[in-house]
Amino acid sequence: MSEKRVTGDGRVSGSSLADLRAELREWLAAHTSPALQGLSEFEVEDTLWGQPSAPGYAEYAAFEEASRQARLICPQWPEEYGGRGFGAMETAVLAEEFAAVRMPRLTRGMGERLAGPAILAHGTREQKERFLPRILSGEDRYCQGFSEPGAGSDLAAVQTAGVVEGDELVVSGQKIWTSGAHRANVMFLLCRTDPAAPKHRGISYVLLPMRDNGITVGRLVTMAGEDEFCQEFIDGARAPLSNVIGGLNNGWRSAMTTLGSERGAVAAVAHLTYEREWSDLVDRVRERGLDGDRLVRQKLAWAYCQIHVMKATGRRVLDQIARGAELGPEASLTKIVWSEYHRRLGEIAMDVEGAAGLVRPEGDGYPLTRWQRTFLRGRAETIYAGTSEVQRRIVAQRVLGLPKDGARG
Ligand SMILES: Cc1cc2nc3c(=O)[nH]c(=O)nc-3n(C[C@H](O)[C@H](O)[C@H](O)COP(=O)(O)OP(=O)(O)OC[C@H]3O[C@@H](n4cnc5c(N)ncnc54)[C@H](O)[C@@H]3O)c2cc1C
C-alpha cells in the first residue's frame, strides 16, 4: 500500500504507516502548544471565526496556518485539490497522533467532511476545481440544508422547491435544525426539482450561496443554552445550474455520499476523544472524593469497557477499509454505539457532580460546566446524523436480514 509523507512543505513520497506516524510525531513535537492542548477543533474554530482581538486568536491562527502548510487540513482529498490523498488508515493514524498529545486536528467542518466527499464523488472536474480550493482555504464555510419541518428521518420527503429559470435554479422553502447556518456562506441543500417523479428521484443537491440571496436565517436555542442551530426561510434564492452536484433530479446519490461520510467518518476513531474524556471524568471523581464509591466505580468501569468495544470495532472497520471493502451498515452500528454510550456517559457525569450539577454555576444565562454540557448535548447525539431508531432499522434490515417495517418475512 502506498503511504503519504507529512512534511512542512506538503511534499508527498512513499513510506509506511509507521513512517507516517513518526513524521506526524515530529511535526506535532514542533507545533504542540499548551494554549491549544485539550481544546476541541470546534473551540479553536469558534475563536478563529470571531474577532482577531479574541484571546488565543493569534496562536490559533498560527497553528491553522502551519496545519494548512503541512496539508493536514482536508488531507483525505486528492493531492490535485490540495489534500494528501490519505486513505482511512492514514486518517486514523493522524487522529490517533493528535489525540495522543491532546491537540485539536483542525478541519474545514461540513465543507471538508460532508460536502467535499459528495463533490469529489459526483461533481464534474470544473466543479471540483471551483469549490474544493475555496473550502480548503476557509473562504467558503458550508452548512447542511437537508432537514425540513416535515422531512427529517424521511429525508426523501423534502418539499423545498427548486425551479429551473434559464441557467439558474430558484429555490424556495424552509430548512430547519441547520447547525452553524449563521456563520456559513454556502448551504449544500436538497430540493425537489421534479415534483412528478417518485420520491427519491426528482431531488437535486445544490450549493446555494447564502448571502444577499433571499435567505432569512433565524437562530434556535438548544437546551444547553447554545444558539448554534438555525432555521432558514428561503424565498427565491438563486444558484447557477453549474452549482448542482451530480446532475439535476439526481441529488439522492450525492445526499447518500454525504450521509455515509457523516456516519462513517467517526467509525474508526470515535474512541479517541472518549478515552480522553473518560480519564478527565476519573480525575473529577477523585477530586470529589468518590473513587471509593461502589456505584460510581461500577459506572466508570462500564464506560471503560464500552470505549474498548469501540476501539475494537474501530480496528475492524479499519481492517475492512484496508481490504478495500466499502463501509455499509457498520457505519450505523458505530453511530448507535458511540452516541448511546456518550448519552449515558453524560448521565454518569451528572451523577458524579451530584446536586451541584443541577444548577448553573452562576445563575441563569451563564455558561454550563463541562459535564452539564456533555449531559445536555448527549441528548442530541442520538438524533443528528440519523436517529438511533433509524440506525437500528438499517441494522435490522441490512445486517439481520429482517423484512422492511410492516412487511412480513
Ligand atoms: C444537534 C443537531 C444538529 C443537527 N444539524 C443538522 C444540520 O446541520 N442539517 C440538517 O439538515 N439537519 C440537522 N439536524 C436534524 C437531524 O438530522 C434530524 O433531527 C434527524 O434526522 C431526525 O429528524 P426529525 O427531527 O425530523 O425527527 P423525525 O424524523 O420526525 O423523527 C421523530 C421520531 O420518530 C422516530 N422515527 C422516525 N422514523 C422512524 C422509522 N422509520 N422507524 C422508527 N422510528 C422512526 C425517530 O427516531 C424520532 O425518535 C440536526 C439535529 C440535531 C439534534
Image: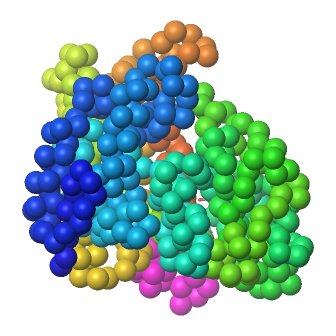
Query: Seen from this angle, which residue lies furthest bottom?
Result: 409
**Quarter holding residue 356:** top left
Q: Residue at x 19, y 76 (%)?
A: 2
Q: Residue at x 33, y 55 (%)?
A: 71
Horizontal relation, residue 274 to residue 342: left or right: left
24 over 100 or under it: above or below: below
Q: Is residue 1 magenta?
A: no
66 over 168 or under it: above or below: above
- For this rendering, which residue is in front, 174 or 19? 19
Q: Quadrant of the N terminus?
A: bottom left
Q: Which residues are magenta?
A: 390-409
- Count of marks placed on residues: 0
Q: Residue at x 52, y 48 (%)?
A: 138
Q: In the image, ligand 1 is in what quadrant?
A: bottom right
Would residue 300 be seen by someone viewing this image from the given angle?
A: no
Q: Position of residue 210 (x, y in %)?
A: 73, 51
Q: Position of residue 234 (x, y in %)?
A: 83, 53
Q: Residue at x 36, y 34 (%)?
A: 62
Q: Is residue 402 magenta?
A: yes
**Quarter holding residue 36:** top left
Q: Position of residue 211 (x, y in %)?
A: 75, 47
**Quarter holding residue 218:** top right
Would residue 297 be seen by someone viewing this image from the given angle?
A: yes
Horizontal relation, residue 134 to residue 299: left or right: right
Q: Position of residue 369 (x, y in %)?
A: 43, 21
- For this rendering, which residue is in front, 224 or 186? 186
